[in-house]
Amino acid sequence: MKKEKNGVPDQDTRLKLFELMLDCRGLQQRAFDLFMQNMVKGTTHLGMGQEAVAAGFGAAMHPDDYTFCTYRGHNHTLVRGVSMTSILGELMGRDCGLLRGKGGSMHLTSVEHGAMGSYAIIGAHMPIAAGAAWSAQYRESGQVAVCFFGDGTTNIGAFHEALNFSVIWKLPVVYVCENNQYMEYTPIGEVTAVKNPAADRASAYGLDPILIDGNDADVMYSHATAALEKARRGDGPTLIEALTYRHGGHSRADPGKYRPDEEVEAWKKLDPVKTYRQRLLEAGIAESILEELESVSNQKVDEATETASNSPPPPLDIAHTDLWADGGASWRN
Ligand SMILES: Cc1ncc(C[n+]2csc(CCOP(=O)(O)OP(=O)(O)O)c2C)c(N)n1
Ligand SMILES: [Mg+2]
């Protein structure tokens, strides 16, 4: 079913995009607050400012499609339908956590939701996403693998290997580079041979250069839909470079002070959630509808925090369970 007209998503889809971004923002903000209260075990890498990328794909993907993401994976996991309680519980090392508190922020995974893992090794998940797409192609299942990664990842060998392999085999995979301008504390432009780290390299693999506004949920949705349809038609992979910005630092409590203040301010004016809210108002959607969505989202975050905080730590006897893979038998053909 076509959910957009002249490139503009229909109203239900737009409200869905807004709702997904609100949930992502609320969850990230709460994760940050809990981290500052020393309630989060281990580290966190937040995607505040990058919500439109995940929301655009989340609204366009089929429930059985696959997501592969990085340690900055809260948004991507949430938009696949994983509950806020299980994500916050995981961050806090609680029994109700997605992995019963044994994975933490960097490893959110829910095979049942098609969220096939958050990977801490830069680029490592790209060939794995190609493998999942190859499996879908072999099984003729119609599933597509979507793989999110950062700008810095384009300088890793696995990026190039995965792209070449995916094109050769015309795999149903979509590679999404979230260019947030920095790899850890280094501006991407200082360490990269081309201006646009993913788009400028697309032609090396026979792909179209796609450079888009990653802070615009409509644009993200429209490109997500096109890339997913292309993959499902059997026309092979797409590489998208989405320009965006992380509002905070790289991880933990990094204040990101190595970035010029003017740069941070300029990007905050392009906040994907605030600008989208304004666009919906201008499109004639009532303020009261948006306020209601905001209130429901805030309530979800509060309830998830409450439930997760009251969940006990995992019992000791699970310390030695789930350590060895079953060879993937539960989700392999
Ligand atoms: C193979 C490998 N090398 C180095 C690191 C250390 N490291 C962690 S995050 C990061 C930066 C990645 O930047 P980018 O791909 O732009 O993703 P972002 O953090 O901006 O989302 C690096 C170098 C790592 N995790 N894996
Ligand atoms: Mg980056």
Image: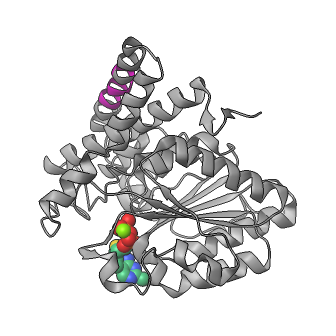
Asked which quadrant contains residue 193, the reply is bottom left
Q: Quadrant of the N terminus?
A: top right
**Colouring rule applied to residues:** one colour
Q: Nearer the viewer, residue 212 or 36?
A: 212
Side of 12 where 290 appears, left or right: left
Residue 96 coordinates in the image, percent (x, y): 41, 42
User: Is residue 160 placed above or below 98 in the rendered structure?
Assistant: below
Based on the picture, tell me whether residue 119 belongs to the magenta stretch.
no
The residue positioned 79% from the left and 62% from the top of the image is 136
Residue 303 coordinates in the image, percent (x, y): 33, 27
Side of 267 where 75 appears, left or right: right
Residue 154 coordinates in the image, percent (x, y): 48, 78
Q: Which residues are magenta?
A: 295-303
| Residue 156 seen in the figure | yes
| Residue 104 seen in the figure | no
Q: How many marks?
A: 0
The residue positioned 36% from the left and 37% from the top of the image is 275
Asked which quadrant contains residue 276, the reply is top left
Quadrant of the picture in which ligand 2 is shown: bottom left
Q: Quadrant of the C terminus?
A: bottom right
User: Is residue 132 placed above or below 28 in the rendered structure?
Assistant: below
Q: Nearer the viewer, residue 164 or 111?
A: 164
| Predominant secondary structure, magenta span | helix
User: Is residue 59 placed above or below 155 in the rendered structure?
Assistant: above
The residue positioned 71% from the left and 81% from the top of the image is 165
The residue positioned 47% from the left and 36% from the top of the image is 20
Residue 55 coordinates in the image, percent (x, y): 50, 43
Side of 95 where 212 appears, left or right: right
Asked which quadrant contains residue 152, the reply is bottom left
Q: Nearer the viewer, residue 225 or 131?
A: 225
